Image (spheres, rainbow, N blue to C red):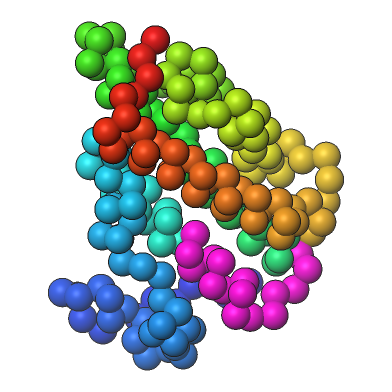
Amino acid sequence: MELLRKTVIDRNDHRNDNGDKKVLFKKDLHPHVAAFHREQWSFIEDETIKENIAYQMQYLEFMICLYNEYQIYLTVESLICKDIMVIVAGVVEAALFDLIELARKKMNMPMEDRTDFTTLLGMGYHEYGFLAKDQWHFFHDLRKVRNYVHLKAADFKEYAGYTVDEANECIKKLEEFREGVTQQSNGKNRATP
């Protein structure tokens, strides 16, 4: 199997890396810059979490564009859908951690460093109101799907395990979650236990 080949043209500006290769997307199809996504997720207080979410959102945009612009083969299609679902789960988990941590800080109740996704989902719905009931169920099921990153955990073949419809539903639920929390943080009181 061939290894990745990276070309560094300018050590001071990594945006020029691999500049000697074919251009993948026209300029108008490039993902938004990270600053756009940081603004979209401005309710996240922890700057590192906000940055990481912004980068994951850029990658999500890239994967969507890649799928929409190129003929993707069956197995790769399924795995792109899997990547999209995993990205969505990771973004929701990080956002919930930050939101709950901030709410708990305001009440002098420190957050445990190792709070798992299941606990965050429960707290996000039951205690803090960051999730609607359908979102709580949806993201709980998505959490289970994310566990299939362990190839031995899946009880199906990877080439047919993930669908475009499932990935699209994840993208819609992510945006619904972001919009709901944005509305909560823009003047409406955040829920408290």
7 or 185, nearer to the observer = 185
Whether the magenta-drawn stretch holds residue 172 is answered as no
The majority secondary structure of the magenta stretch comes to helix
- Left or right relative to 68: residue 101: left
Q: Quadrant of the C terminus?
A: top left
In this rendering, is residue 177 above or below 5?
above
Q: Quadrant of the N terminus?
A: bottom right
Picture residue at 54% right of the left edge, 72% below the top: 65
x, y percent for residue 12? 15, 74
112 or 8, nearer to the observer = 112
Whether the magenta-drawn stretch holds residue 67 is answered as yes
Picture residue at 56% right of the left edge, 73% below the top: 66
x, y percent for residue 33? 31, 66
Q: Residue lying at the far left in this picture: please name it.
A: 12
- Residue 42 lies in what quarter of the image? top left
- Left or right relative to 54: residue 179: right
Picture residue at 31% right of the left edge, 24% below the top: 189
Magenta region, residue range: 60-75
- Residue 11 lies in what quarter of the image? bottom left
Judge whether residue 52 can be spotted in this image: no
- Left or right relative to 83: residue 73: right
